[in-house]
Amino acid sequence: MADDSGKQKGPMRFLSGVQPSGRLHLGNYFGALRQHISLQDEGEAFYFIANYHAMTTVNDRELLERQTLDVALDYLALGLDPQKAVFFRQSDVPEVAELAWVLSTVTAKGLLDRATSYKDKVQRGISASVGLYYYPMLMAADILIYRSNIVPVGEDQIQHIEMTRDMAQFFNNTYGEVFPLPKPRLDIGAKVPGIDGQKMSKSYDNAIDIFQEGKALKKRVMSIVTDSTPLEEPKDPDVCNVFAIYKLFSTEPEQEELAAKYCAGNFGYGTAKQLLLEKIDEMFGPYREERRRLENDPAYVESVLAEGGACARAEAQATMKLVREASGLGKMPVPAGKMISTP
């Protein structure tokens, strides 16, 4: 582990989660998934499918189950190795809900009142449930229960990491040093524009799904918003949504070549979109084949999640033992089915 001064006390531990609230898209890949997969070679990686969190927006049982499976398939197809990373469902570790409650008893309500994510979601029409308001508390528990050092996140999640650090410090100040203070890790250049130029997001309906293909993918790419500059006139690649997405898939020489075509004129946005489409197919084609293979082996996918859940839960229970001892809650309860022996 590493303390807040940065002194290393053991392997670096990374923790991150993704909500199963819809199909994963290019913004998810370049903003999170790509980084997650690379980090599995740099330290201890814990990645979870945040189905507790998804319940704030997904209230359909079958849909939640299907979307949870979709996220598992996506991660495994894109290269997550269950031999290198602990990959699991959030709900397979119920201790996280217990820790969230404990943290809530030492956290002032005003901290949650300042959460900008809650306000933004309510403004977008998401029901203002207690669960949505409580979201930062559960997220803090997700991070702290595995005693994580580094949390790979996008810029919009930085406030939640700061709140997590505050909650860990509140607990440590009250009951003694139990939790390390985690730090965020940003993926440089991870902001991905959607087809309308806003940040790519499921909630904005402007996303290009990672595993979209064929006519559906072509229709989405061809829908990317561009300006009305005539074909024959020069165009500015630096303000073009198509070029911004193309840069994510291409080498620097390829970017320079395409930029030169923009600036020279007699080059249409339709041609640029076709080049982008080819790049998407080139990158994700092999992953599509792997995903189809995994779809036909649901028992394997379930075994990965079950094994990851067992490993994650063992870590969580070890942390909760420390929390219970520090706070006076007593020993961990006996697992169901086991008898307490008497003298």
Image (cartoon, rainbow, N blue to C red):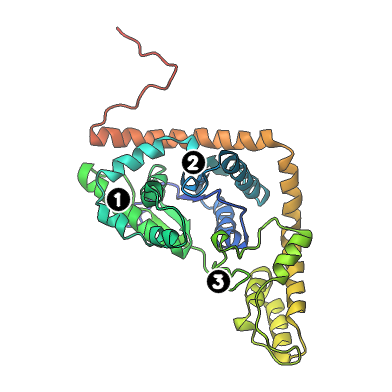
Alpha-carbon span between mark 1 and mark 2: 20 Å
Q: Residue furthest top?
A: 343
Q: What is the tally of numbered marks visible in this picture?
A: 3
- Residue 167: mark: 1
The residue nearer to you, when weighing 255 against 19, is 19
- Residue 3 visible in the current orientation: yes
Q: Amino acid at mark 1?
A: Met
- Residue 198: mark: 3
The residue nearer to you, when weighing 240 against 8, is 240
* Residue 270 horizontal/vertical position (percent): 76, 78
Alpha-carbon span between mark 2 and mark 3: 30 Å
User: Could you tell whether 244 is left or right of 262 in the image?
Assistant: left
- Residue 90: mark: 2
- Residue 71: mark: none
Q: Amino acid at mark 3?
A: Gln
Measuring 45% from the left and 63% from the top, which residue is drawn there?
156
